Amino acid sequence: MNYSKRAFALTASAALAALPVFAQQTTPSAEDTVELDAFVVTEMADFADQAILGTTPVAFTTFDKEQITKELGSRDIPLVLNSAPSIYATEDSGGAGDARVNVRGFSQRNVAIMINGVPTNDMENGWLYWSNWDGLGDVSQSIQLQRGLSNTSLPMPSIGGTLNIITDPSASEAGGSVKTEFGSDSFWKVTGVFNTGILEDKFALTVGAVHKEGDGKFDYGWTKGEGYYLGATWFVNDTNRLELYGIAAPQQHGQRFDANIAVWSAKEAKKLGYTDAQIAAVERFNNSPRFYGSGPVDAGFDFNSNAAPVDPSYTGQQYYWGGLHNRYDANFMNERVNYFNKPQVNLNWFSELSDNAKLATVFYWSGGEGGGSGTYGSIQRYAEGTSLVQNYDWNATIERNQNRTPDANGELSSYGILRNSNNEQNTYGIISKLTYDFSDEVSVTAGVDWRTAEIDHYREVRDLLGGDYYWYTGNDFDTTDAQRKKRLGDKIAYFNTNTVDWLGLFVTSKYNSGPIDAFGTVGYSNIDYSYLDHFTDVGGGEKLYAEANGLDGAQIKGGISYEFSEQFSAFVNAGYVDRAPIFDGAIDDSTGQLVPDPTNETYTSVEIGARWATPSENFWISANAYFTTWRDLTGTDVDEQADIVTYQRGINSDYNGIEIEAAYAMNEWVRFDAAASFGDWTYVSDVDYTQYTISTRQQLPSNGDMLYLDGIKVGDQPQTQLAYAVTFFPTDGLSIKLQGRSYSNYYADWDVFTRNNPNDREQSWKIPSYTVFDLHVYYDIPAEFGPFDVSLFAHVFNLLDETYVSDASDNSQYEGLPVGLAGTESHTAQSAGVFFGQKLNWNIGARLRF
């Protein structure tokens, strides 16, 4: 970011933040404290642009603290959202924190995810890893998912929706709670939260801590982690309040790759049309390098090809998080381990400048340190016919490294090692919103959203597997043998530093008069990217550097709702977003080269909806329809072996659908809930692409190269979804909820770059429809236990032990049978790589409040 824009951002933020003057240093009375406590909740929800039922003209679903408490059950946060329409969240591989969520056919790269109104998506590519937020569900006051463009004022891409998590404000009453949980696969977790209450009518503090461990939901899929939370409030005076929030969740867990269906289960493979010859073909190829993510036939649903036993006599330590550590278990070794800690700290300043003006400012920092492990170099594999079904033979690898001829210094160079792919980042930001009420009906909010991030990407030596060093010559700045000997913690493969500087400006106007509520938002964003390659010498000792500056984006959106009566209301909203490219759309992160002619993507959206309720609100139903276009999607595909990089521009797709939600409280003992969504998400045009050589950056001649996408359905989320539940309240404090979900019209995820054959117009593999049920039991025991309140809970997920495919990749390069082998056809179950959904699993526990 150039200095003039950085100075402008800081000046604008400081100007907004400096407006209040602490002139009234009065201490709130007891009556004032009650008002201030209400002010806490209202201001945070307002700052985070949370939608209000019957008022905000957008489609949304809110999960309050009670629902989160009764249904989440130590799962990743997105999994509680599956009862809402057009939301599809899965556990993916089943690793702790590896969940993903799609909204209206868009992955979470295009869903704005915020904590207390602060964006948390990766500033380079929009992704988010839920393992970074373990324990957040325990301190969440509410989770709201606004589908579509939403009413969020920040000018950030949120075409799929906006997920906003609000944590508990500091409690006004002293007390706390301790919760213990146990579950399948030796899982256990303990959570403690303590509140000071209001101290001296001015201060309040909430602290929380979480610890969890477990063997994992698949072989060698162990999990271990902690979570920490702090929330503090200081009532400076009647008109100013400061809040400090901090959260961190360092964790580690084993991971695994997807596999061919026949690897998981030969029985399921035959159900899906495999022939005996195709199953035999999977068996023959399971030790081929092409099948490094697969395994032998019928290995079982708990199979993990990315870990294997190791002789405990090997005591070599592993390097990560800046130090040496012992393996999680001396008897096995994981190829794939995820480890990360992403703390976030917010300092919030809420101020009433006058009866008509208020200011809300958040200063925040988000760090990040960690990554994932894998192999590097030559690793020994188990020979065919051995009793072990894993991919790698760690003992043979260690033996080969240790038997290598020593160098002149008597040291051993490892043939193959374990490496870490690391990400270290620091993000600083300011969001400031100044709101002025021109009248009881009209208010205007103007604000600034400034963020800057520096991210290091590199690989490092994790485990030398019996050797003393790994010989690496890929760093141009290593000029001696000593420098090329890479030991534990030394960087290999790549080392890049990326920066992202973001400046957003926005103005939102709201109107409320009688039955009419409306809002309108305009926003502008400007992004600068830079890339520095620490391994590549471009001449004279100068490192490879690239920057892309002044990438602009804009948005305009608005909506109006009308309350025809106390029972019936309707809304309409529309918007247009011009989105600047993500990092890889401007700078090719794998080569460090500028992308030719980076282009903006555009979204347009129109949505209409209505809600009707009975006078007693014991029955309500809401429905909405949306019409969304996504234009000029860009992408990059790198083939380093062929020395070719491919750029595509102008991919277009349409997303249309209907969503319905309803609830009926029959009486005080029974309640019914239902949600349904019917989508039609399709690519609508073929596009051409261009190719360049990586080494020379010369454009290759075009032969009419095209990607043939027109009419192909969007994959990775079911386009028809149903959710339904019945809840019983047989006695005071007891609820029993049976929840079901049915999915169909589900096309496997697919890569647009594979669609380069004009004769291939078939849809990706259609995943079989499935239904799954969960059971949730929660009991607030009414009996007295002195100063304590006791709650018991139990969850059974996949109650009927259904077997189903939850995630799939069409024509998988590594896990699918090659087209033509044993009669395998394209876009079929045989050519896919999949994960199956988790079998029946459970979680039980107790909570003690004091």
Image: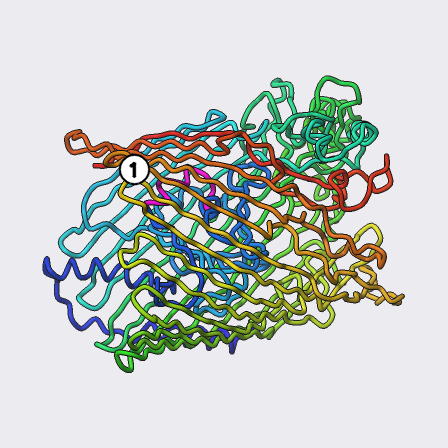
Instruction: Indicate left or right for 501 with 591 as reference.
Output: left
- Choose between 734 and 101: the one closer to the eye: 734
Quarter of the image where one finds residue 666: top left
Q: For the image shown, how many numbered marks are present on the structure?
A: 1
Image quarter of the C terminus: top left
From this viewpoint, is residue 355 visible? yes
Q: Give me the residue at 46% from left, 41% from top.
A: 250
Instruction: Indicate left or right for 780 with 770 as reference.
Output: left
Establish if 566 lies above or below 333: below
- Choose between 752 and 246: the one closer to the eye: 752
The x and y percentages for residue 823 are: 86, 37
Q: Give me the residue at 25% from left, 34% from top.
A: 731
The x and y percentages for residue 501 are: 54, 67
The chief SS type of the magenta part is helix
Q: Give me the residue at 40% from left, 67% from top.
A: 431
Q: Which residue is mark 1?
A: 729
Query: Residue flagged by tag 1: what amino acid is it?
Result: Phe
Instruction: Indicate left or right for 20 with 432 as reference.
Output: left
Q: Secondary structure at mark 1?
A: loop
Quarter of the image where one finds residue 489: top right
Instruction: Indicate left or right for 598 with 346 as reference.
Output: right
The x and y percentages for residue 113 are: 47, 56
From this viewpoint, is residue 545 visible? no
